[in-house]
Image: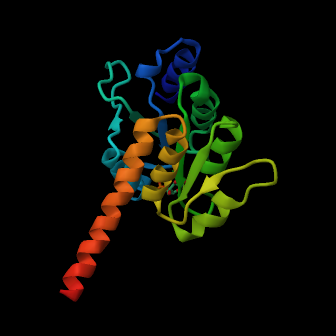
Amino acid sequence: AVQSIVDDLHAEAERDRPAADTPEVGIVMGSDSDLDTMYGAYEALTELGFAEVTDREDPLEARYTFETYVVSAHRTPDLMYAYAETAEARGIDVIIAGAGGKSADLPNMTASIAYPLPVVGVPVQEKSVNSVLGMPTGAPIVAVDAGKSFNAALSAVQMLAREHDQLRQRLVDYHGSLQAGVGEVSRDLHG
Ligand code: RP5
């Protein structure tokens, strides 16, 4: 099964996919046990109007989309390599990569292989932080604190927003809604 996904990724990388059929954001995580933690990224992307591509054959309706793969650096190294190696050619603009444990190698290996595509790393637990952040000079990764996948998605969309005015506006509106929310809490507290 893994080999057929690897083959599909390479086939997609070689095909000239129209931009409208290409997810802007790729989410990868080391295990399906990371799903709960990575759910924050789904929430942020959905809040900003992204839709998840669940069937690559289906025509996409939403303007902005993301895809999700479970890719383990240790159990499926070939798949990790294929995903990261083909991401740019497949049309992905930014990857969010989450992994847990003390050997959370997926985010940093993905960043190295997918370079120069930006990768936002999410250490799933506190103990994973050093392994995600411990990159040598010249091999960059952007990372958030343990479990902060919501912020990882906001950072990814900030990168995209430099070239997409609509996304920039959604980020500004989202920030405005945060301020309004805080304002309401203060009003409630102080009458
Ligand atoms: C890591 O090992 C994964 O990212 C996950 O956080 C952790 C444990 O994986 P499971 O044993 O729950 O599949 O590579």
**59 in relation to 157, above or below:** above
Return the residue nearer the eye: 20 or 111.
Answer: 20
**35 in relation to 57, above or below:** below
Residue lying at the far right of the rendered structure: 137
Residue under the image location 46 percent in, 15 percent down: 18
Say left or right for 7 vs 32: right
Residue under the image location 40 percent in, 44 percent down: 169
Say left or right for 99 vs 39: right
The colour mode here is: rainbow
Residue 54 position by quadrant: top left
Return the residue nearer the eye: 182 or 23.
Answer: 182
Pinpoint residue 6: horizontal percent, then vertical percent.
55, 25
Residue lying at the far top of the rendered structure: 15
Pinpoint residue 130: horizontal percent, then vertical percent.
66, 65
The total of numbered circles placed on residues is 0
Return the residue nearer the eye: 39 or 118.
Answer: 118
Pinpoint residue 15: horizontal percent, then vertical percent.
54, 12
The answer to whether residue 182 is seen in the rendering is yes
- Dividing the image into 4 quarters, which one contains the C terminus? bottom left
Residue under the image location 27 percent in, 80 percent down: 186
The answer to whether residue 67 is seen in the rendering is no
Pinpoint residue 27: horizontal percent, then vertical percent.
47, 42
Residue under the image location 38 percent in, 58 percent down: 175
**106 in relation to 64, above or below:** below
